Image: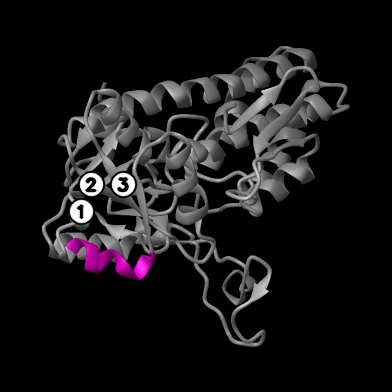
């Protein structure tokens, strides 16, 4: 199934609970906004494109549950709930984009019933488009890979981070679909091990060769000539930086030192056309993510913890950004990305 989708029968949001992987594959159902925001904040659903769909479906769910009897009351209610949803992951620009896109569509409504039908149709359109755009992105990126290449990636930017197909791993899938033999080195991605738990699981499910390493091994494997390119996803791209899972910046420095291409794969919806790096809020995660692993204590309970979810990679460390509209090599203007086809 898709990572996240709408259940027409129950009018609920269904998703794969990614916190349980790789031990258990479980589909959960969100039938109220509290369960959705909990799923987003706890990373049951995660990844920029998937969060865009979650934001859109969240507004559709809110409209379905509302008892508002007239349009303006319902629209005010949806805007308020939209702000609650967006606040769960402040760095992830796709989440806010999905919420705002569906809210904007509601402006064409003429009564409460039409609001409900319009926002659901728009949310479904976001999900369907995500799959199509990722395949276009993958086709562009596949041209950058040679037969026999080994790609290193960080965190998870595959189909589990999207509605389907993937961004960074979508490039790998598209290259393989084109007949190229590609191997992947996946960094574990501490503290929540999305690379080990999700990327490795996802690639093995699809019979794509993958080797798991610790985050601290990336310099060694690049030095040893084991990596032909690095491809990562993104949660936010400004004019001057790429925000992705913490540790990405380190990999970009090492790749640059060893003259290895460092690619970012992300849909245009991940670009922030309004802000620069110093204006982006980086989400701070719970300290217990470092004090525990799999419910097992691994650090003193009272040790101070610094746990940012993302870091900023300067654009000068990026070889190219791969989008559904093509490949863009810095320096470029964000408007070029938006209007290119």
Q: Is residue 218 magenta?
A: yes
| For the residues bearing labels 2 and 3, Cβ distance under 8 angstroms | yes
Q: Which image quadrant for residue 26?
A: top right
Q: Residue at x 45, y 47 (%)?
A: 199
Which label sits on residue 150?
A: 2
Of pointers 2 and 3, the one earlier in the residue sequence: 2
Residue 103 horizontal/vertical position (percent): 62, 29
Q: Helix or strand or loop: what does disc 1 sit on?
A: loop
Image position of 33 (left or right of 142): right
Circle 1 Cα neighbour tier, 10 Å, few/some/many (<14 / 14–19 / ≥20): many
Closer to the camera, 336 or 141?
A: 141
Circle 2 Cα neighbour tier, 10 Å, few/some/many (<14 / 14–19 / ≥20): many
Q: Which residue is mark 3?
A: 184
Q: Helix or strand or loop: what does disc 3 sit on?
A: strand
Q: Is residue 320 magenta?
A: no
Which label sits on residue 71?
A: none
Closer to the camera, 274 or 284?
A: 284
Q: Which image quadrant for residue 315?
A: bottom left
Of pointers 3 and 1, the one earlier in the residue sequence: 3
Q: CA distance from mark 3 to mark 1?
A: 9 Å
Q: CA distance from mark 1 to mark 2?
A: 5 Å
Q: Which image quadrant for residue 192?
A: bottom right
Q: Is residue 115 above or below residue 238?
A: above
Q: Which residue is mark 1?
A: 227
């Amino acid at each position: 199934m898709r990572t996240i989708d709408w259940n027409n029968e129950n009018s609920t949001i269904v998703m794969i609970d990614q916190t349980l992987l790789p031990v258990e594959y479980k589909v959960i159902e969100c039938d109220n906004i509290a369960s959705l925001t909990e799923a987003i904040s706890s990373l049951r659903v995660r990844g920029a494109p998937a969060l865009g769909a979650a934001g859109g479906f969240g507004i559709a769910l809110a409209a379905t549950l509302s008892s508002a009897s007239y349009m303006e009351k319902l629209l005010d209610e949806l805007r308020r709930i939209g702000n609650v949803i967006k606040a769960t992951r402040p760095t992830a620009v796709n989440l806010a984009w999905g919420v705002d896109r569906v809210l904007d569509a509601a402006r064409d409504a003429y009564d409460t019933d039409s609001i409900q039908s319009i926002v659901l149709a728009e949310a479904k359109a976001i999900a369907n488009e995500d799959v199509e755009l990722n395949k276009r992105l993958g086709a562009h990126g596949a041209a950058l890979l040679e037969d026999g290449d080994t790609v290193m990636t960080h965190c998870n930017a595959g189909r589990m981070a999207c509605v389907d197909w993937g961004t960074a791993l979508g490039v790998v899938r598209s290259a393989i679909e084109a007949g190229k033999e590609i191997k992947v080195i996946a960094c574990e991605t501490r503290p929540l091990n999305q690379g080990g738990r999700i990327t490795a699981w996802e690639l093995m499910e699809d019979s794509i060769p993958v080797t798991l390493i610790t985050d601290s091994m990336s310099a060694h494997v690049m030095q040893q000539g084991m990596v032909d390119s690095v491809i990562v996803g993104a949660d936010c791209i400004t004019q001057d930086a790429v925000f992705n899972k913490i540790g990405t910046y380190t990999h970009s420095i090492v790749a640059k030192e060893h003259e290895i291409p460092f690619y970012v794969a992300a849909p245009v919806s991940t670009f922030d056309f309004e802000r620069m790096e110093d204006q982006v809020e980086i989400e701070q995660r719970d300290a217990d993510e470092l004090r525990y692993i799999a419910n097992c204590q691994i650090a003193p309970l009272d040790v101070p913890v610094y746990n940012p979810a993302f870091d900023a990679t300067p654009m000068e460390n990026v070889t190219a950004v791969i989008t559904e509209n093509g490949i863009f090599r810095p320096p470029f203007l964000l408007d070029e990305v938006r209007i290119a086809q």
